[in-house]
Image: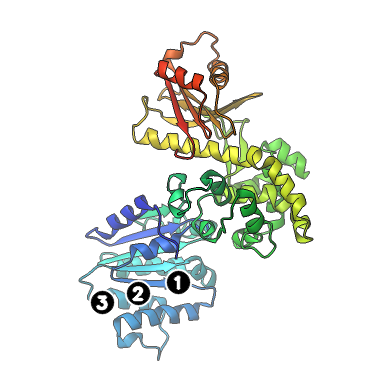
Amino acid sequence: MMKFIDRIDEMNFLEKEYNKKTSSFVVLYGRRRVGKTRLIKEFIKNKNSVYFLATEENEIENIKTFQNILYLKYKNPLLSNNKVLSWNDLFYIISTLDLTKKLVIVIDEFQYLLQSNKGFSSILQKAWDEYLKGKNIMLIISGSTLSMIKREVLSYSSPLYGRRTGQINLKPIRFEYFKDFFENKDIDLIELYSLTGGVPKYIEMLEVKKGIYNTIKENFLNVNSYFFEEPYFLLEKELKDIGSYFSLMKVIANGNNKLGKISASLGIKQTSLSYYLKNLIELDILEREVPVGEKNPQTSKRGLYKIKDKFLDFWFKFVYPYKSYIEIGNIDFVMNIIKKSFIERHVSFVYEDISREKLIELNLKNKLPIKLSKIGRWWEKDTEIDIVGIDDNNNPILFGECKYTKSPVDLDVYYLLVEKSKKLLRNENINLENLYFVFFSYNGYTKSFIEKVKKEKNILIFEGDSI
């Protein structure tokens, strides 16, 4: 089994809920493959717990399974298999147990119970209110079908609304912990991260070969590989009319990020696209990005859409458009396309995301010379700045560039960033001493750049994959 990495904040939160003197009710949700079950199992180690994994079987079979798990643990004759009880009966029996030590009840893949009984949220709500609340119990429900979990558990209209004492929206592993999965220190972590996006299951399944292109060929261009069909399995339970969503994501992955361009590429009216875009954003697959500092981001006409999930972004750029070539064995054709544009079209953008993530982390820990209220990207017409940090008054005070290049960054990059910052500030005569400039370079800096950094106190630099 793959070693358990990161999840420090999540484990601390669960422990805090567990140590409450009162009952607690935690909702754990997130996209498939992100490691929810592994987190739960690590948490309940050495704890008094009942773990129930719901299945797609009918309701009676799920009740039988849950009842049997309880019987094997407590040997209560009321739980014997001679008679199949109701959910209400089972929860009532749990409430009558002598729980000197807190009991953790886990219902994993909760959405399957909702599928077999649309009223299960009401059943659980009644059981919590009448039997479980106030007992020495911690209830954890976990689900992967995000739309259903949000609607049936988290939304205001759900019977369970207001019952939870906390929730965790589990995200992929951050890059700073990514290296801990690999014993081989001679691999390019950023390039591998751009393929998996920090999703634990993908990291586990990835066969790392010598050289990134051999890794891609073996894992993504092999019709029998795990990753070749993965997006279908990932999204088929979340979305209807999956072909329309795939076409939309292919267009966005190809660089059509503006609503007008997406509409034109698909031949679909902009108003008709909103339904699909909204669903993908809710699933944390897509995001709408606006220039940092926009006063009205929701209504901004400068919004750009991009695939947030790095694995899916790679797949829709380099696998899905060429599936027909791969299926007939024309792998070399596809590999040539990937080799020509993998860094420029994919890795360089992932490096930007990693760099911004690092800066956000340092800002939260107060490890920057200034305190920023927001960090993001900025663009206007033909000008783009990879990183812009703004203060509490919405004034840009930090500007940054990210370079994933073969050669070290030279001083021209600094001077170009200064000129771009003038455009953002609408001021040709800005005082540079009041601003900060940050640079992320995978292959370091020239001697002249380093000398410049030594002279100036407002230039910050980061290098390699140690960010």
Do tag 2 and tag 1 residues touch (Cβ < 8 Å)? no
Disc 1 to disc 3, C-alpha distance: 22 Å
Residue 414, how many percent across, how many down? 53, 20
Nearest to N terminus: mark 2 or mark 3: 2
Q: Nearer the viewer, residue 79 or 130?
A: 79
Judge whether residue 249 can be spotted in this image: no
Instruction: Name, please, the residue furthest toward the left.
Output: 100
Callout 2: 10 Å neighbours few (<14), some, many (20+)? some
Characterize the local packing of mark 3: few (<14), some (14-19) or many (20 or more) Cα atoms within 10 angstroms.
few
- Identified by mark 1, the residue type is Leu
Looking at marks 2 and 1 on the same chain, the residue that comes earlier in the sequence is marked by: 1
Q: Secondary structure at mark 3?
A: loop
What residue is shown with label 2? Answer: 91
Compared with residue 433, is residue 305 higher up or lower down, i.e. above or below?
below
Q: Which residue is nearer to you in this view: 238 or 319? A: 319
> Is 246 above or below relative to 423?
below
Residue drawn at point x = 37 percent, y = 28 percent: 368
Q: Which label is found at residue 53?
A: 1
- Mark 3 — residue? 97
Taking the image as drawn, is residue 247 in sight? yes
Q: CA distance from mark 2 to mark 1?
A: 16 Å
